Image (cartoon, helix red, strand yellow):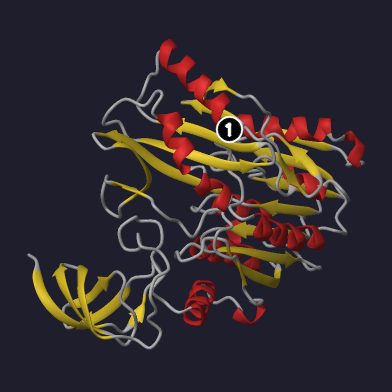
């Protein structure tokens, strides 16, 4: 039952919500800050902020007019210094909870506004025309964006053109997701949703695409038109990612992560790159090591393999590929016996089963990349218990004003008898 309450905010939670500790338990209040006294409508453990009676000295004016409505950013009201301390602290809390030495945490690296080259928008045709933006938090409502301080100017500047293109084939009242990747050839658009454009709509979309200058349009996996081949660079290796491909969000942060990984693997002759995607790390590692790239996404793996073959002038060492669902069928300790280094970059759920196999293997160096500090800490704990030493872990913030945090952990096992995961 909802009620209006006056609450004192004690701390900022892992998801960026203010937390009020009451006699009946914790209440989470979005857009509030520690030390504030607020009025909110409470409904169980959640509350909607009505007003701030006593503001925090760390409260600032959000840079975007859509803040609190578009569902994209959650922390624009927090000062930059306080935000950075809180964001880096997410990793420290996660490691501490698993008893991992937090002195190994390196200074965090932060991206700038207007640098995200990949975005997944929502779009819908209404009586007002095409609405393009992000979905409001806990709602299906698409907030039509007039400004955005997260994506690159190239992506946001194409907003009107994207609407014009979508108007050629998007039916009324059908919400779709539009993945936009900024490539060297222009914007690559992949539309997914419960729509079935006919031949007339496809021809109209192709004509619009050609006129508007986008590199490629796909709808539910079907290429409607690709006037230019979308390509990106991993280091100096040119890659043509498949439609809607996962790319690291901010190029500068990708370079920072890749630099940490490649330096750690510099002495390894054979490296297994697990959850390899299109080759973000594998193709850079191939400058100095023989690489075996393992990935469950067929199109991504094909793009990686094609890039290796097309970049013969880059003097890459051999890169082999294997399509494999690493969640259901991780690389075993036996599979890993021929490698002296392993890189893994799993989804948010982490790589628990894979970490146990690495722990039982003869691998000496590991680079673990994660977008979830909590599952990273769990996976690191498995490796540390098996004799690996944590050399460093670096927080990487490429999702500004959100609770999402990347990290790169580097581990090494220098000697001693391995412990099998079943003994732990």
Q: Quadrant of residue 33?
A: bottom left
Q: Position of residue 395 (x, y in %)?
A: 60, 69
Residue sticking out furthest to the top: 199
Q: Nearer the viewer, residue 127 or 344?
A: 127
Q: Nearer the viewer, residue 369 or 48?
A: 48
Residue tagged 1:
214
Can the viewer see residue 117? yes
Looking at the rendering, in which quadrant would you find the N terminus?
bottom left
Q: Position of residue 225 (x, y in %)?
A: 57, 21
Q: Position of residue 85 (x, y in %)?
A: 51, 80
- Disc 1 is placed on an element classified as loop
Q: Residues within 10 Å of mark 1 (few under 14, many from 20)?
A: many
Q: Position of residue 251 (x, y in %)?
A: 66, 54
Q: Nearer the viewer, residue 18 or 213?
A: 213
Q: On the rendered structure, is 295 left or right of 349?
A: right
Can the viewer see residue 424? no
Residue sticking out furthest to the front: 211
């Amino acid at each position: 039952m909802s009620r209006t309450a006056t609450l004192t905010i004690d701390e900022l939670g892992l998801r960026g919500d203010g937390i009020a500790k009451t006699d009946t338990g914790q209440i989470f209040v979005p857009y509030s800050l520690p030390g504030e006294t607020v009025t909110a409508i409470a409904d169980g453990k959640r509350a909607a902020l009505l007003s701030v009676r006593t503001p925090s000295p760390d409260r600032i004016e959000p840079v975007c007019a859509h803040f609190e409505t578009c569902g994209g950013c959650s922390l624009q009201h927090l000062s930059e210094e306080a935000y950075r301390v809180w964001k880096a602290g997410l990793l420290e809390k996660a490691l501490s909870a698993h008893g991992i030495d937090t002195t190994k945490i390196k200074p965090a690296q932060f991206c700038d506004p207007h640098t995200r080259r990949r975005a997944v928008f929502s779009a819908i045709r209404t009586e007002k025309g095409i609405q393009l933006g992000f979905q409001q938090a806990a709602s299906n409502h698409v907030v039509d964006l007039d400004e955005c301080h997260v994506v690159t100017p190239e992506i946001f500047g194409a907003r009107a053109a994207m609407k014009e293109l979508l108007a050629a084939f998007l039916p009324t009242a059908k919400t779709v997701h539009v993945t936009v990747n900024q490539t060297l050839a222009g914007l690559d658009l992949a539309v997914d949703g419960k729509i079935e454009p006919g031949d007339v709509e496809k021809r109209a979309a192709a004509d619009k695409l050609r006129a508007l200058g986008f590199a490629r349009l796909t709808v539910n996996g079907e290429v409607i038109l690709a006037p230019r081949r979308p390509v990106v660079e991993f280091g100096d290796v040119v890659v043509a990612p498949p439609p809607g491909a996962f790319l690291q969000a901010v190029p500068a942060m990708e370079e920072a992560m890749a630099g940490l990984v490649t330096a750690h693997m510099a002495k390894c002759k054979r490296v297994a790159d697990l959850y390899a995607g299109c080759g973000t790390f594998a193709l850079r590692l191939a400058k100095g090591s023989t690489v075996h790239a393992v990935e469950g996404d067929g199109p991504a793996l094909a793009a990686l393999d094609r890039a290796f073959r097309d970049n013969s002038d880059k003097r890459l060492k051999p890169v082999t590929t294997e399509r494999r669902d690493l969640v259901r069928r991780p690389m075993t300790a036996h599979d890993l016996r021929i490698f002296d280094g392993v890189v893994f970059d799993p989804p948010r759920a982490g790589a628990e089963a894979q970490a146990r196999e690495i722990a039982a293997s003869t691998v000496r160096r590991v680079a673990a990349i994660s977008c979830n500090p909590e599952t990273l800490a769990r996976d690191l704990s498995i490796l540390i218990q098996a004799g690996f030493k944590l050399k460093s872990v670096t927080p990487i913030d490429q999702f500004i004003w959100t609770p999402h945090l990347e990290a790169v952990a580097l581990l090494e096992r220098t000697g001693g008898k391995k412990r099998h995961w079943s003994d732990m």
